[in-house]
Every structure is written in structure tokens, then in C-alpha cells.
Image (cartoon, coloured by chain):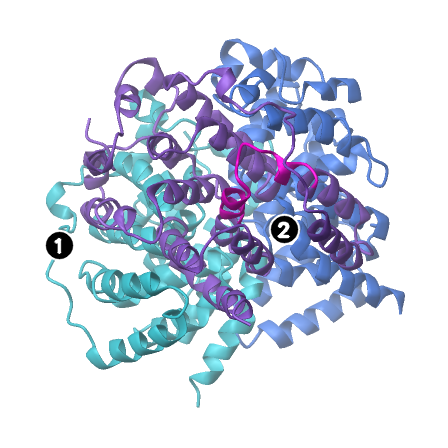
Chain colours: A blue, B cyan, C purple
Amino acid sequence: MKLVSAALISLGTLTAAIAETGSGPARASTPASILSSADVRSVAPALDKYTQDNLLGDLWKRPGLSPRDRSIVTLSVLIARSQTIEMPFHLALALDNGVKPAEISEIITHLAFYSGWGNATAAVAVAKDIFAQRGVRPDQLPPASPTPLPLDQASEQNRATRVQADVGPISQGLVNDTGRLLFNDLWLRPDLAPRDRSLVTVSSLIAGGQVAQIPYHLGRAMDNGLTQEQASEVISHIAFYAGWPNAFSTVPVAKTVFESRKK
Amino acid sequence: MKLVSAALISLGTLTAAIAETGSGPARASTPASILSSADVRSVAPALDKYTQDNLLGDLWKRPGLSPRDRSIVTLSVLIARSQTIEMPFHLALALDNGVKPAEISEIITHLAFYSGWGNATAAVAVAKDIFAQRGVRPDQLPPASPTPLPLDQASEQNRATRVQADVGPISQGLVNDTGRLLFNDLWLRPDLAPRDRSLVTVSSLIAGGQVAQIPYHLGRAMDNGLTQEQASEVISHIAFYAGWPNAFSTVPVAKTVFESRKK
Amino acid sequence: MKLVSAALISLGTLTAAIAETGSGPARASTPASILSSADVRSVAPALDKYTQDNLLGDLWKRPGLSPRDRSIVTLSVLIARSQTIEMPFHLALALDNGVKPAEISEIITHLAFYSGWGNATAAVAVAKDIFAQRGVRPDQLPPASPTPLPLDQASEQNRATRVQADVGPISQGLVNDTGRLLFNDLWLRPDLAPRDRSLVTVSSLIAGGQVAQIPYHLGRAMDNGLTQEQASEVISHIAFYAGWPNAFSTVPVAKTVFESRKK
């Protein structure tokens, strides 16, 4: 079965997991979720050509962002937009590109908070089949309540003070949940590095057109180790997966962040 | 079958309707639409813990917003975002929390106009099965053409004048439809109270990141009886179901509305 | 089987293709994707009435925008929002309204870039069944690499210079892809007229609330032959399919574009 993204096989180790969905009950459980290259050509020959030549043959191979980072970005975009049809392929590719099952688990949990509970639920429904196909064991998943990473007290104090001042008069419940659940809990979970957690967050914001929230999180991502070169290529990569307009709307706010950090 | 939100059973009367989907043709008609708690743990143990402890064990029990209001808000968010996977559970919960079938019918119809026709269609496809499982009778649904609520002529005249001036030069068709179909028809349908209709509208706007349209409708919601305390908790509740960024982007516009009403 | 939009039969030639989905394997491959009018009435009698009277009985028959244009706009909205449930009906209606299979193919490919790759993939999954039902032959589809339309060198030079200055310092990859893939390739594909390509783009931007990108593309659409009257009615039409808030948020930017062109 030639897949939409069969050319990716030449990129690495994309293996039997996808091919196995070609027949039998595994496929039955994900109807219409994987299109063959022939399926695409039966409607849009040009779309297949762009997929093979420009996405798989160029974008994913470019320097500036590793295949592992591109997989984290792409998964985040798909989850943030609930685009389940492309998830089986990209979950399998992410595993092949070195994203660990524990990291995928954390990406989904993280996006429950940053994209919405239903986005995470929809991703779980797809990921459980891929995890089963790949033989992911329970001990490969992060515990529900792990030992947290150490908290940067000063940085958190700054954040909390600012949010209390800005948000407290409007929704104290939101202030409380943000402090307790996000910055003193979710962000300290150790199975996804803070830099990758920031990459997930920024990718989901760009994918959802949530420009107003990008400056804080892009700055935080760069504090956490994302380079400007990588951030530039994240925008370029997301143009394909969340559409050109979302990439272009990110440019002015990214410019503000990049320039403010040079001072 | 332990459901994602099985802990909610302790909240109230969540009953056989969901459990019945565990086997037989009812489940077959909603494939993958209900995940068990074990399904979630097979991918993301932490997501299950947050669901049980922080959503069902805390958020839904908080003062500030009744369970019925939380159900109206949650359904509105799911419909506005076409997140069908969580709809069966939340439609059943809404009925248990006292939202009448006629009100659910009106929420879906209302959001055809405020979120888009396809959003309403997708919700109908799920709701018809839940209504059938619950034995909802045709006489429990609102008539297509009921006796409308009385129109507040002065308020409507103000609205119409303002919209004619702002929108008329750009799209007279939009002006005409807005007056005729929305404010002289949809909003006067009696089976959903204006306060609840406003709650649906505001929730869908926050869920879709449509910040520019929030001030008018949040003000209208408060005119229709939504208190500031309730509005604050709506924002906090929606953070979980539509993601933190949408909640945070609502804060500055809510502040403007809250402050303008103190004068 | 009476369909949601059965009244449209009176509009034209909507034929056996949809009715055929009422039984047999074709329907099996698109479960829950077509609701009957009775299905809608079993949840929301008012929604069915509005659909019959105000959408099919009024909106689609109004002057100001041809049925073919309304189909292009509606398909673009549905693809941009991944609302697959309404796609089978509207793909069939588009064919009946004179949108060629080759044009539908190009609309989907175009929106891979402007809405996101997953949006196009989801549309392909639906369109391939409709194309098969209608007997669309491979020679009716556009070639992957056709002879391009001539490039307006001066206009492209202006665009490239502006984008290099604005975007280059932030993401040179995005600048390169925009020039090479979009304006020197996609926009020059001959099987969708530039005016229709612009109509697709503007519709998807309005549908996604991407206000910041509307001025450039609405101006380009009008350069490509879209009249102000048509643009006004596009906004009015989209109110129904992408929700009133997206239509209203478009009004101020459309005003700016309309006024700037009078000078």
C-alpha cells in the first residue's frame, strides 16, 4: 500500500506499524484515517505531488529544525486543530523520529490545558491504537504523579504577581488554576523537557491563530532553549500544517519577541 | 464500563444512558466517541488523573456557577468547536444536570447562527442518538414556529440603527438577516431563556477566540441576568474545555465590559 | 430519503448521487455524514425550518452572487473548518451548480496551503467517494504539473519585495516557500481562474476568523475581478456557514478595503 507520505520511508525507519493498518481489524478501527497516495491522486494529483516533493522531499529534510522537532511541532498542530485524519501517520512518524511514547503522552496531556480537553480526548482515541500496534507498555508511560522538576521560584513569583494583577480582578478562579495546575504542576512534569513543552505550546498557539498569547510563550520557549533559528523554521513548518495565514499572522509578534531579546 | 468521567456518577444521577452505549448497536453507531478511563490511562495516566481530580472532583462542584450552567457552557463550547467525541457524555450529563431536551434543541439551533450551520448539523448527528436513548418525545421539543417572546422595541431600535450604520455600507444582506432572523426571530424563541441564550453565545465566542464580538454579547448577557461572578467563573470553566489561551484572551475584553458597567 | 436540503432539488439538478447514498456500500463508507430532514427534526425542528426556508428557499436564490459562486464559497468554508459532515451534500451540489471536478480538485489543493494540509486531506477523503459516485474520470482532473498561467512580473516583484522586507528577518524559509510554491506555482495553475482562487482564499480567511490576512487577499480578489457587490454577498453568505461573529468581524476590514479602492 503506497501511503500519502510513502516517500518518508526514505527518510528513515517508518515501518510496519502503518503498513499493518492496510488490512484486518486495525484498519477497521481507524476508517478513513489513512489515505493512500492513489486516493489523493484520484481527487487532486497536484496535492500528491506537493506532498511528495515539497513536504516529504524538502521541508522535513531541511536544516534548522530536526526531524524530531518537526514531529513535535506537527503533532501539536494536529492535536490543537483536532485533525485526527493525519494523526495515525504522524504519531507513527514521531515515534520513528525519536519522540518517546512518554513524550507523546505528555504532549497530549499538555494540550488538554492549552488547546482544550476535547482536543486531548480526540488524540487519545487515535494514539491508543498506535501505541497498541507499537507494543507500548504501561511502564513506558509517565506516572500520573511523578516527582516534579524543581521550580524556579523567582521566575514563578514574577509570573504569579503579574497574572494576579492582570487576571485576578476578572477571574480569580482562572488565576488559581493557572498557578496551581499549570505552573506548579503541569510544567514541572519531568517526562517532557521544558524546552519541548514550550515548543508544543508555541506550536499550538500559532496553529490556533492565538496571536495574543504568543509573545509570552515564545519568550519562555527561548528562555527554555529554543533558538531563534529554530523558531523561524517552526513558523515556516507550520505554514504547511496550519495554513499560510496562521504563519503570516505570527510574523509581527515573533518580530517583537526577537527584537526585544536583542536589547 | 468505567468511563472517562465516571466519577461524575457521584455528582448526581448520571445513569444508564451512557452505560448502555457499552455494547450493542447503540455503541456501533457512535464509534470511538466514548473513551473509558482505562483507554485514557493507556495513553496518558496524568490526563485521567486531572480529569477525575481537577475537572470532575473540583471544577464541576465549585460555587459561582451551577452544574446546569456549567453544562450549558460546556455544550456550547463543544458545539462551537465541533468536538463530537465528548458530546455524548456531555449531552447525557446536561440532561442529568437539568438542561431540558427543548433547551438542548434551542442551543443547537442558536449555534447554527453563531458558530455555523455545519456545527449545528454535527451536533444533531450526536444528539439524535442520545435523545433516542433517553426516550425524548417529539412533544418535548420546541415547535418550529412558536409564539415569540415580546420584543423590547427600544433596545432593538438602538441595535438596528447601530448595525445599519456600521454594517449597511458593507453588506446590506448581513444587516437584513441579522435583524429579521436573529433579533426578531431566533432570540425571541421562548424555549431557551434570554439569559441562557446569552450564556450560549458568550461561551461560543470565547471558545472560538472571537474576542471582537465579546463586548456586545457579554454586556447583553449581563443585561439578561448573568452576574459578574458567574461571568468570571464561565471564563475559568472554559479554560479547561477550550484551552487556557482562549480564556486569557478573554480577560482584557471582560475587564472593559465589567468596568464600563460600574459607571 | 428526504435530505436536510431536499428543497434544493427545486433549485436545479441535484440528482441521484445523493439519493444513492441512502443504501448500500456507498452510504456505509460515509456513516453519519448525511442527515435526513427527519433526523434534524428529531432534535431541532426549528433548525430544519430555517434550513428549508431561509437557506435553501432564500439565501441560495438571492441575486448578488451566483449559485456557482455560493458553492465555491461554501465548499471553501467547509474545507477551511474541516466540517466533513456537510461536505458530501455540498460537493454534489457544487457539481450541480457548475463547479467542475477539476475546479474542486484545485480548491482542495489550494486550501492545503491556505488552511492546512490536514484540511485538504480530510476533504480528499470525502471527495473521492463523491467523485467515484459521479463517475469522474482521471482525464477530468488537472495534471500535477500543467503549463502555468503567465506571471504578472511587476505585481509579483512588488509582492516579493514587500514580503522579503516584512518576513525575511523573521523566517526566510517562509519567504522562500511563499514565493516559490504559492505565487510562482499554485496561483498560476490554470484549472481554477485567479478570480475563483481569490474567492476561495477570502472565504477561507473569513471562515477562520483570520482578519489580519483579509485586506491583502480581498484587494487581490477585487483586482482579479470580484465585484464589491459580490464581496458584500460573500460576507452575508458566510454568516450562515461560518457563524455570524466571523461575518461581523470581517466588516471593519472590508470597509477599509472598499474605501481604499475608491480613492
Report how many numbered discs are placed on residues in the image: 2
Q: Which residue lies at the image location 71% right of the left edge and 45% below the top edge?
A: C178
Q: Are marks 1 and 2 in contact (CB under 8 Å)?
A: no
Of residues A175 and B166, which is closer to you in this image? B166
Q: Position of residue B17 (x, y in %)?
A: 29, 35
Q: Position of residue A112 (x, y in %)?
A: 57, 46
Give the residue at mark 2.
A246
Residue range of the region highlighted in magenta in the rendering:
C184-201
Of residues A247 and A261, which is closer to you in this image? A247
Mark 1 neighbour density, 10 Å: few (under 14) some (14–19) many (20 or more): few
Identify the amino acid type marked 1: Ser
Question: Are the residues flagged by discs 1 and 2 from a single subunit?
Answer: no
The rendered magenta stretch, by its main secondary structure, is classed as: helix
Q: Which residue lies at the image location 55% right of the left edge and 30% below the top edge?
A: C121
Identify the amino acid type marked 2: Asn
Of residues C116 and C163, which is closer to you in this image? C163
Check the image and report above or below for B238 versus A163: above
Q: Position of residue A97 (x, y in %)?
A: 77, 28
Check the image and report above or below for C19 versus B260: above
Q: Secondary structure at mark 1?
A: loop
Give the residue at mark 1.
B145
